Image (cartoon, grey):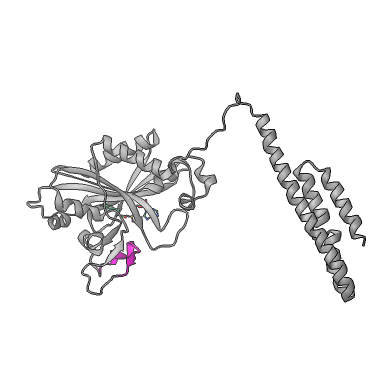
Amino acid sequence: MDLEKLAQQAKTSISLIEESSGLEQWRIQYLGRKSALSLFFNSLAQLSPEEKKHLGGKANKIHKELVLLYKNKKEEIEKNIFKKKDSFLDITQPGEKQILGHLHPLTLTAREIISSFEKMGFSIIEGPEIETEYYNFDALNIPEDHPAREMWDTLWIKPKTIKEKSRLLLRTHTSPMQMRYMEKHQPPFRIIVPGKCFRYEATDASHEIQFFQIEGLMVGENITLANFKAVINELMKNIFQQEVEVRFRPSYFPFVAPGVEVDIRLKNGDWLEIMGAGMVHPELFKKAGYKNNQWQGFAFGLGIERIAMIKYKINDIRLFFNSDIRFLEQF
Ligand code: YSA
């Protein structure tokens, strides 16, 4: 192969190039894996030692020259692009639109729910995500051997010492705040407790291992399930901006008597469970130190994701947490 001729050709053709697409073609033709020079390097093994030394050295020199030519040309083209841009800068053009961040659909839903309760006179309280076994279970009438513990598949936290009195866990619901609050406050009161909960369970379209609940607790002298129904109807009206069909189903939770589950009717006619609730069990009032059976009240635990799913027509709860920007951009 005539190396000199090849080098001359390459130099002439690069001197005529003005744009990066042309330069890329040049690179492939003269420096690419299938270029004449690369094929020549591959065939060196078949030459005699003297030829190898002579021609190999020459080819190496040409290769270096071509690489340098390529680099210089690349820089020259890039500089020219900036020059061209400057000379065409049109300051009357509108600016580029900035992409702004926005709130997560669960934050939007939680804020709406909270604001609706605020309008009804509820105070907002927060509690710990890492809870003791006592407040998560025992204080709610669920001792260790109680079968109801199986309703809440629990993520336990490894104790630092074996002697720790009350084991720690990631709260499985926001209900532990009922006792924490009642121990320190006398009725009448109405509170809600929004917060994250965790459960050791398989995920599916309506179950996650972490999700948000809003706990509610209203205690007074004459509070009944009728008050609860009025509060829930008002909440649904505020959130969905229309009358929503609500259904109470008898259910069991050790910390209420009677207990109910609340469903709402979806557009397709199906019912979806959104919360557990009931009249606070007298045993809890006793544990909190309230005397004389003077108080009664309702409590509930509402799933925020379930409400957001209905409001925004989302059919899989897992979409909230997998950070897919195509999903999040829609809110
Ligand atoms: C019951 C009586 C009370 O006086 C106060 C509160 C309660 C509710 C009780 N603490 C509880 O956690 N019940 S629950 O297990 O049925 O969950 C309540 C709501 O949380 C469900 O209706 C659902 O909306 C949501 N939820 C539960 N597990 C979930 C979930 N959301 C998403 N993923 C999960 N894995």
Residue at image x 34%, y 55%? 197
Whole-percent x, y for residue 209 in the image? 41, 58
Height in image: 324 above or below 142?
Answer: above
> Is residue 331 located in the magenta-colored stretch of the structure?
no
Nearer to the camera, 317 or 42: 42
Height in image: 18 above or below 127?
Answer: above
Residue at image x 88%, y 52%? 8
Q: Is residue 190 left or right of residue 274?
A: left
Residue at image x 46%, y 52%? 321
Residue 261 appearing in the image: no
Q: Is residue 91 left or right of residue 65?
A: left
Bounds of the magenta segment: 145-158
Whole-percent x, y for residue 223 in the image? 18, 43
Q: Is residue 19 left or right of residue 121?
A: right
Whole-percent x, y for residue 157 in the image? 32, 66
Q: Is residue 14 left or right of residue 293?
A: right
User: In the rendered image, which quarter is residue 58 located in?
Assistant: bottom right
Q: Residue furthest left?
A: 292
Name the quarter where the N terminus is drawn: bottom right
> Is residue 147 located in the magenta-colored stretch of the structure?
yes
Height in image: 33 above or below 145?
Answer: above
Q: Residue furthest top?
A: 92
Nearer to the camera, 324 or 135: 324
User: In the rendered image, which quarter is residue 218 located in?
Assistant: top left
Nearer to the camera, 131 or 148: 131
Residue 270 appearing in the image: yes
